[in-house]
Image (cartoon, helix red, strand yellow):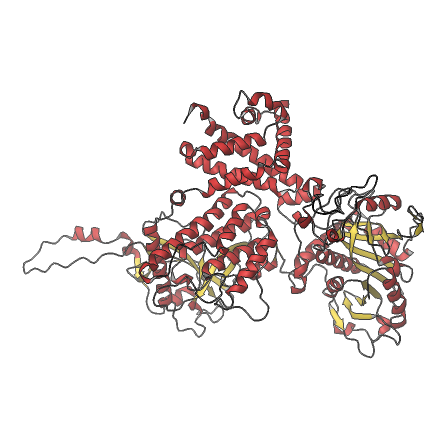
Amino acid sequence: MSSKTEGIPELCWEVLPWISNQAISLGLETQDNRFAQLGCELFVFNQQLSSTGQTGFNSKVIKITELVNKACSVAVDNNLREYTPLAALWRIYECKNSNKSAGKLLVRDIRRSLRRFVQKNPEYPSLMRFISDYLHAIDPVDAQVDEQILSDTDTKYLTQIFNTLYTQLRIYSSCSCSTQHLQNAWLRLDLERDSQDNTGVPFELAFAVGPGYCTTSDKFRWKQAKISVARRNEIPQKKEVSFTAQPSNSSLRTQRISPLTEDLRKVEVDEFCRLIGSETNKQLSFHIHNNTLKLDNTVQRNLLRDFLPEAGMPLAQWLEQTVHLSDRVKVTLAYTIARSVWQYYNSFWMVKPWTHDNIQILKEKPNNMSHAKPHPYFTTKLQHYKGEIQDYCIADDLFHIYPNILALGVVLVEIAAKEPFRPDGPYHLWNETTINDYYEWAWRTANRSDLGNTIGAAYKAAVNNCLDTELFQDSSFDPPNFEKDLEMRQSLLYEKVVLPLRQLYLAYKDDWEIQENPTAEPIISSKGHTNDSRPKNRSEFTVAIFCALPLEADAVRDLFEEGWGEGENYGKAAGDANTYTLGRILHHNVVLVHLGGMGKGAASRASSSILSSYPEIKLGLVVGVCGGVPSYSGCEDDLILGDVIISDGIVQYDFGRQFPDTFSAREGVVSRPPLSIRTMLAKLKGVHVQKRVEKTISQSLKTLQNKPTFKKGRYPGIDKDELYQSTYQHKHQQPTECKICGVSEEGGADRVCEEARTMTCQQLRCQKDFLVSRRRLQEASAKGCVPNPKIHIGPIGSGDTAMNSGQHRDGISAQHNLIAFEMEGLGVWDTLPCLVIKGVCGYADSHKNKDWQHYAAVTAAICMKAILQDWVIGG
């Protein structure tokens, strides 16, 4: 190492973790994933640099170090830069642990420098590319040595061990049970395989035991077994034939006998089935030695894991039923599966692709965690296979010819998006007619999920390599070289897929957060109601619920305990043009009114007609979605997307006079609800009741999202909750892109073309610099959880004009003290005692999108049901 770079490795090892933490903190504060990505990449880079020591310090590392120094440089460093190489990094080294003003000043300066570098400096992409190139240039053999992974020769030998395990299980699992339950084995997928066992390669398996499974027990349970496969079978000793007496050498014979074999007993016919079905909690331990399954009676340990007494859950179902997974859980699960696919590649265990159906989750009983710990297992029916295992499929017009690799890519995308592939129609088998369907879905979903920003560049690289049709372009299918080419594909699988995920797995340090849907019934329950509560006629319906959009009505309909058909006793009156859905929510018989359109006109016509058919309606609820005012007057907490607005008054904000030069809104007159509703609102505004309702909403969300109809109502993601400054318009950002959007207006809002109004912020490249940070989102992101919806009670603005302007929103809301804008409430307000309950799906600005409509409609519907739980309809 030259004198010019002397001491730089030690400097990097000291300061890079500190810089990484600062970048990640900035990502949490600004909700800008570029900072989080930089922090994670620097962490992985430093880990690799530390492991290689001085030998890993080359010209690439020097270039990366210089760019990191530039990213941390502030104006005061300019004079020092000419005389002191890496002045910014040396300053961090000297002051990072200081509790005095120098340490505080350092944090402020470095954060300011990182902001400027990431958001404005064109060299930021170069830095990320240099780090990525350095990490991917690691010699795979060195990485395998670090992980104590076997060499190519031993990998080939491991395949023989995997096949031996499979074959012996297939032979010994045949039993006399009518269910033949042992034909299916659950093989545990491990992050790290124990390589310290000199007697054999260990495996963990589980077998389902329950009614009819060789046991008298009527309860379902899991029987776990550890099976060790001998690394080398003993070579039989040649017998020496002699006609003369030979001296006995018992000590020599004793030395030739493996000490392990003395404690092993061969498993007899049908004994394996009886052992699995035994009532004892003792863990079973077997050893496959000389192609014979033997029982080890010396093991006295109890069960390794206390699994819940329930059947395994396919990965697809687990992903759908789990409300939230932290990135650490996703990366760990993805790395575990990818590493297992690489290990078992070219063995009998990989005859069929590993998918979200044969990868199953077994749940361990909760200990100190709030959720059951999931363990991934691969399950398969043990069948007899002959000949070589082919890992390719050749047919006309195939997008991808390696089903096992493509299946792994599909699983990685499903885990990242938490969205399993559900093809239209019957279940898709993996064959040449359906491979293209899987490929197209994985490609589209990966692009839509933006894996590089949501999880990490390494995860995106692993998925891209799985979907890369040219990944194995140098391999062939010629019979003479088939085995060698297969080993080459297995090696590339590790280098291009497993290794990037391993690096990401080592880098992630966020919470191990899993939020599952509770198995109990929804919190909002109906007690004591049976079919005897069926209404006798139309006069027994007392609550009307008005919804303008089909998705709003769907969210309400899913909360019905029972649905009433429109028979002759329930049918609407002659001349009533409305369309209704009848049912029961809790102890209320309700009429769901499907409005013919948006706006107060459609709502007014519907509310006027309903009393002719259902004369005893005492309460009208307008339920759906709205645009919220993010910083309304008196707001004690941030208003974010998914929160629920409840009206205690209503203002027609678009009522006024149009002059030649301007529109003058009439001074707002707030219409107050009747006394019966005001008293209920007074109770709801109390801290204890409001907290109880908010808790009910959060708990019910976790339960109700398990229903298929609530699939679209899942939380879209913290990163998709974007609030821009009110003066920042949604338009083409570069003057050269559009002549209309490129013209700046003095003293008012700029003109915007019609095309821009239909495009997303991502398509228009709206700048993240203009985003407004919110404390609730930052706290939820730091904890790795979904923010719980809150309720906001206050006056709302209602009119036929959709509010899509941040500046007008702030001005009108300040004038009338509004907390939200919607379009139907005013039409019902003057006809029925009315309450507007709407979920916030946008911020009533020009950056509106429809990603949040389903989730907001669900939160509003659940809040409506929580309020009806305590509501008593007067006579």
Toward the bottom, the furthest residue is 568
One can see residue 426 in this view: yes
Position in image of residue 189 (x %, y %): 45, 55
- 611 above or below 852? below
- 380 above or below 32? below
- Quadrant into which the N terminus falls: top left
**Identity of the residue drawn at 41% across and 53% down:** 301
Observer-nearest residue: 557 or 95? 95
**Identity of the residue drawn at 69% across and 39% down:** 769
Going by the image, does 715 lie left or right of 496? right
- Quadrant into which the C terminus falls: bottom right
Position in image of residue 865 (x %, y %): 76, 60
One can see residue 309 in this view: no
**Identity of the residue drawn at 89% across and 75% down:** 575
Going by the image, does 705 lie left or right of 602? left
Position in image of residue 113 (x %, y %): 62, 31
Q: Quadrant of residue 679?
A: bottom right
Position in image of residue 596 (x %, y %): 82, 66
Observer-nearest residue: 314 or 430? 430
Observer-nearest residue: 840 or 744? 744
The total of numbered circles placed on residues is 0
